[in-house]
Image (cartoon, helix red, strand yellow):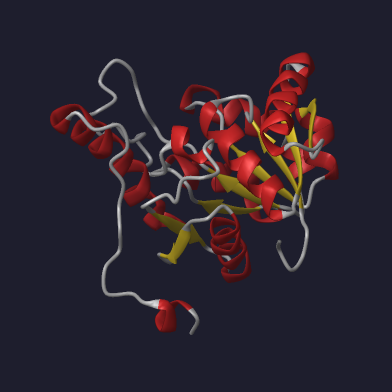
Amino acid sequence: MVEKSLSICVVGGTGAEGSGLALRWAQAGHKVTIGSRDVSKAQSVAAELNAILGKDLVVGVDSKAGSSSADIVVLTVPFKAQLSTVELLRDELAGKILIDVTVPLVPPKVSQVQLPDHGSCVVGVQQKLGSKTRVVSAFQNVSAHKLKDLKVEIDCDVLVAADDKEARETGISLAKDAGLRGIDVGPLANSVVAESMTSVLIGINRKYKVPDAGIRITGVGVAQLNQ
């Protein structure tokens, strides 16, 4: 169990990545809500997660209500819905940490890196929201289907970037609570690496016929992580 329970709203949590993270954070002891414009769908996914957990720990809510009451908001919507969702929740996100999991995938060439004109799509969110919201980039390179299997130890590191040090540390802590190793990669501009890497990993999966290629940062041990 976590030392301090946080209230986390996973916006877009009806999808594979968001629901997997929600499941692991609820198991760790956080108060988790699934946020969606479709409340009935959010409630249905929450019920599925609670069945896996064996307890009613996750609640499905409207995205605005969930974001308003949460300590941390996690954005797990598709790239095409990223900016419109952020604009919808602008007021609710003020004064909070927003962890953005978005990857700029542009079908049909999802194995080809296609960053927006301004570079990192997560940096674009920070620019849109301004200083009232501290944006963190994390969890782009994690296998969604493995997140949903609580028995699986995921062999993948999480690159965590943010301009605010405390927000970055929060992202690293939440990675640990999800059973992953968070790596501090510095300012939000460095999010472009994780965003690009997802397309590369998709290509690796296809080439080598594996479902879940991931990344590991070598040379960094427990002692360095605890510094």
Front-most of residues 5 and 106 = 5
Residue 33 picture quarter: top right
Q: Judge from the rendering whether residue 218 lies leftward or rightward of residue 179; answer left or right.
A: left
Residue shown at the point (80%, 36%) measured from the top left: 66
- Does 105 sit above or below residue 220? above
Residue 112 seen anywhere in this rendered image of the structure: no
Q: Judge from the rendering whether residue 172 lies leftward or rightward of residue 52; answer left or right.
A: left
Give the residue furthest to the left.
207
- Does 92 sit above or below residue 45? below
Q: The N terminus is located in which quarter?
A: bottom right
Front-most of residues 182 and 137 = 182
Residue 199 picture quarter: top left
Front-most of residues 31 and 151 = 151
Residue 177 picture quarter: bottom right
The number of callouts visible is: 0
Q: Judge from the rendering whether residue 69 lies leftward or rightward of residue 216; answer left or right.
A: right
The x, y position of residue 56, in whole percent, is 82, 35
The x, y position of residue 90, in whole percent, is 72, 38
Q: Judge from the rendering whether residue 168 lies leftward or rightward of residue 184; answer left or right.
A: right
The x, y position of residue 221, in whole percent, is 36, 77
Residue 127 seen anywhere in this rendered image of the structure: yes
Residue shown at the point (71%, 63%) measured from the top left: 2
- Does 205 sit above or below residue 167? above
The x, y position of residue 93, in whole percent, is 74, 44
Residue shown at the point (23%, 38%) measured from the top left: 200
- Does 13 sit above or below residue 23? above
Residue shown at the point (39%, 32%) measured from the top left: 104
